[in-house]
Amino acid sequence: MDARTLDGVPVWLKPLKFGVSNAAFAFTLAWILAALGERPAFVQRVGWGVALVLALENVLIALQAARGVHSHFNATSYLDAAIVTTMGAAIVAAMGLTVAVARALFRRPAPHACARAVRLGLVIALGGASIGGLMGVPARDQLTGLRDGAVLGGHTVGGRDGGPGLPVTNWSTSHGDLRVPHFVGLHAMQVLPLVGWAIARRQRPADRQIALVRAAAAAYAALVGILLWQALRGEPVASPGPATLVALAITAACIGGKTLTRP
């Protein structure tokens, strides 16, 4: 119904992606909060806080899409700058609430694999969320044009945002893209609990299950780190160079070897 594009992609693609991602985050966090049923006041505060923050972000992104302008890194007018600032403050608030949930989980016993996976997944997700802060750092040429209004920050390393990208995600195929480690890190809170659930289904001793969960978490955290390193070097995720491949191979060998040799 709306044929407009922004940076070569439909203007409503970003609201769609953020809506799906925020929904996945909200449902996962709600599932995690169910484990803290003995603290109903805490659960209610966190639940309402995260719901309001995510709703605000979705509304503002949709508003900017309707206006046909960028929702992030946009300081071309006072209104755009105010929207970017509001979204940034909202995300910081959401991260603060998530840290409180992680703290509450770590204060509880976690005797089985799935509980350990939830805790570790949430920690990695917080690390992935913090990568978003790197995107808000303006480049030198952006600061030069700030007086007349400018785009401050961006997710592409080695080039400007926009240009050729992967389907749906639009991750750059010609430069580094900080959205890759940001996305992978954020969704650790879904992936690792599923891994923990799969490990717990097998008839293994409890200590062995926990060791496997720790290995999976270490591998996932290492993957996020390697993807971040790759992006910061300006290398496209779809075209990994020798250094990236060697880092992945060494990580797999170290973690896999330690897991296999553990009694």
Image: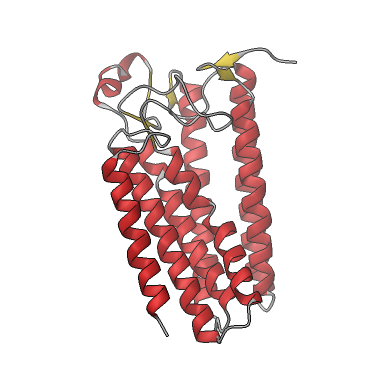
Structure colour scheme = secondary structure
Q: In terms of depth relative to the viewer, which is nearer, 232 or 12?
A: 232
Q: Does the rendering let one see residue 239? A: yes
Q: Where does residue 193 sit, x and y in percent of width and height?
A: 59, 65
Quadrant containing the C terminus is: bottom left
Q: Where does residue 241 sit, x and y in percent of width and height?
A: 30, 38
Could you tell me how many numbered marks the image carries? 0
Q: In terms of depth relative to the viewer, which is nearer, 146 or 185?
A: 185
Name of the residue lying farthest toward the right: 1
Quadrant containing the N terminus is: top right
Establish if 46 lies above or below 162. Answer: below
User: Could you tell me which residue is drawn at 65 percent across and 20 percent down?
Assistant: 66
Q: In terms of depth relative to the viewer, which is nearer, 135 or 232?
A: 232
User: Could you tell me which residue is drawn at 64 percent across and 28 percent down?
Assistant: 62
Q: Does the rendering let one see residue 107? A: no
User: Could you tell me which residue is drawn at 62 percent across and 45 percent down?
Assistant: 22
**Residue 182 shown left or right of residue 25 in the figure:** left
Q: In terms of depth relative to the viewer, which is nearer, 85 or 57?
A: 57
Q: Where does residue 142 sit, x and y in percent of width and height?
A: 30, 22
User: Could you tell me which residue is drawn at 64 percent across and 24 percent down?
Assistant: 12
Q: Where does residue 82 sit, x and y in percent of width and height?
A: 49, 29
Establish if 10 lies above or below 105. Answer: above
